[in-house]
Image (cartoon, rainbow, N blue to C red):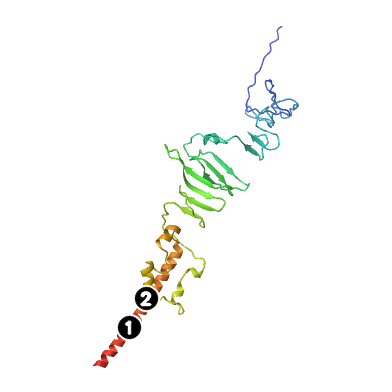
Amino acid sequence: MKKIIFFFVIIATSTAAIAQTSPLKPNTTYKTRTSKSPSKTYSTKTPAVFPNGNPTNKNVVYQYIDTAFPNSENQFPVIGNVGIGTKAPQSALEIKRSAGDTRRKNFLLQLSNTWSPNGQNEPSIMFSNGDISDPKNVAYWAVGARVSGDKTINTPQTFKISFKAPGVDTEQEFLSVDSYHGKVKIGDVNTNYDGYKLFVEEGILTEKVKVAIKNSEDWFDNVFEKDYKLMNIYDLDGFIKKYHHLPDMPTTEEVMTNGLDLGKMNALLLKKVEELTRYVIDLKTELVDTKKTVQKLSKKKK
């Protein structure tokens, strides 16, 4: 009687990982061993694939990767930092390579998703300290990409955002944040704005501007105080004829060089209005007194 031998072939779809305690040798054939039994153990003296637990749905889940390929720049330890392009990673994951001559060649990590009709297909990176509840996303470099975090994103240098129009070789910068001095510039222009926190090219359109003052000395309500001395009207006339502007007011050259301080200018304008008001009151008083004197003289002649 002949024996009938049945051969069963089990095909499992899996993502394999290699676990070993010594580097793989080039031009060497290694056997891959797998098992679906959680109690099955193997020796780690030779390269092998080790399962982690009892897989389901015909998928084999593997426990770890521990390789150091000969002459490679990658490091995948069981415990410690992972390095791609470096054998001495300084963080949990470090990706390193030489600089390229184009923007795309300098990409160290690229994230991409297929298009989705519901608009929720943007690749994302989320930073969290463990208590995140509602992360806010920040678009970076490309439309749809986002970087999000529940705390802060720090940069030791000036952070810049720029764009390059189709057919244009040079990039145009439209936003930069100076991390050293906490200053912000909006626009593609080199200008010195030392002493200021914000520069905006071509101006700002807004429905409301509120300027605060640091102390009462920046305002001029003291013009109506009794001890405030007005410039003599004839001295004022001589000043205007010589300098062609009111006292305390900046010249055209000064405004062109230093700009216009809205808070200070409004205070100076108020001061001049109050001084002019006092001049008018004084002139009115003199006019009334002169009129009374004329009337008295007229009565005496009669």
Residue closest to the eye, 67 or 48: 67
**Residue marked by disc 1:** 288
Q: Residue at x 40, y 77 (%)?
A: 232
In screen coordinates, is 187 left or right of 279? right
Residue closest to the eye, 209 or 88: 88
Question: Considering the image in quadrants, where does the C terminus appear?
Answer: bottom left
Q: Is residue 110 visible?
A: no
Q: Is residue 159 visible?
A: yes
Where's residue 147, x and y in %? Answer: 55, 43
Mark 1 → mark 2, Cα distance in angstroms:
20 Å
Q: Amino acid at mark 2?
A: Tyr
Residue closest to the eye, 151 or 284: 284
Residue 234 circle label: 2
Q: Amino acid at mark 1?
A: Val
Vertical position of residue 228 compared to residue 44: above or below? below
Of mark 1 and mark 2, the one earlier in the sequence is 2
Write down the quadrant of residue 83 in the picture: top right
Residue closest to the eye, 121 or 74: 74
In screen coordinates, is 80 left or right of 290? right
Where's residue 39, x and y in %? Answer: 74, 29
Element type where label 2 sits in the image: helix
Vertical position of residue 269 compared to residue 185: above or below? below
Q: Residue at x 46, y 65 (%)?
A: 264
Write down the quadrant of residue 291 in the picture: bottom left
Where's residue 301, x and y in %? Answer: 25, 92
Mark 1 and 2 residues: CB-CB less than 8 Å, in contact? no
In screen coordinates, is 128 left or right of 272? right
